Amino acid sequence: MPRAERPAVGDGFDGGGRVMYAACALSQFLVAAGASVVTTMGPALREANGLRASWLPSAVLVYVLALGLLVLPLRLLIRRTRPLPVLILGLWLFVQSSVALTLVSGAPAFLAFRAVQGAGAAALTATALALVLALDLDLDGQRPDRLLLVWSAVVVAGFGTGLAAGAVVGADWRWALWANVPLTATAGIPLVRLLRSTRRRDKAVGAGAGAGAGDGDGGDGVGVGQGEEAQDAAA
């Protein structure tokens, strides 16, 4: 990952690192819930989209396949570019596909937008992994194994919440998908703000370092010129 997009490691969990970790964990909660929510939505979902009961596993499969196949290429893309564009892409795809799933009719369109939702989930997952791995988890007495345990628990909780939400909503199944809009914004807005502020700060630091290097080079040039003039005068 480019240095300009790395979290401020020196801030640790006393600064933006804690907020960044929480926002990344929430994004993965939503990714896990999005995978499982359609499995228990029941007859109302199938009637609205012409889905047979035997097709519901396919709605989960296309989501998981898109997530699994794209997360690694997107992770590599983040290493070559920056996480912010991938994050914005993931937020846009996940929110737009969640809304589209409540509006389309027909099994092919529903499955297609589930795949788009999985692509958005892959972008969110790749960004979250990149940001969390860039944090210095040893600062301030924070144990990496404890934080990874919390991360795993959040993912499991998201999967279980998706199953429960799908079973509870019943005929109002669209609300479970519309809820992705405010929840995704809750996770995404802090991450976007932190990445932009970190980028601006690193640019300012880089500009200051460049100016300092230029002053140093100018000082050396004057010193060399003065030395040569002194040698000429002595000669």
Image (cartoon, rainbow, N blue to C red):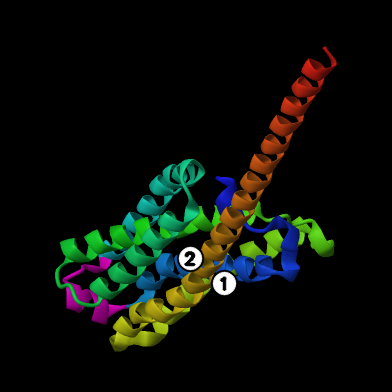
> Can residue 202 be spotted in the picture?
yes
Q: Position of residue 194 (x, y in %)?
A: 56, 66
Q: Is residue 75 left or right of residue 48?
A: right
Image location of residue 235, percent across then percent down: 82, 11
The residues colored magenta run 42-53
- Please report the residue visible at 54 percent of the width from the left and 71 percent of the height from the top: 26
Q: Nearer the viewer, residue 225 or 60?
A: 225
State the CA–CA distance, disc 1 to disc 2.
Answer: 8 Å
Q: Amino acid at mark 1?
A: Ala
Identify which residue is drawn at 76% across, 23% down: 229
Q: Is residue 200 left or right of residue 234?
A: left
Indicate the quadrant where residue 177 lies: bottom left
Callout 1–callout 2 Cβ contact below 8 Å: yes
* Mark 2 neighbour class, 10 Å CA radius: few under 14, some 14 to 19, many 20 or more: many
Residue, disc 1? 157
What numbered label is drawn on residue 50? none
Which is more toward the observer, 141 or 209?
Answer: 209
Residue 114 colored in magenta in the image: no
- Up the image or down, 186 lies above or below 126; here it is below
Q: Would you name the residue on which mark 2 appears? A: 32
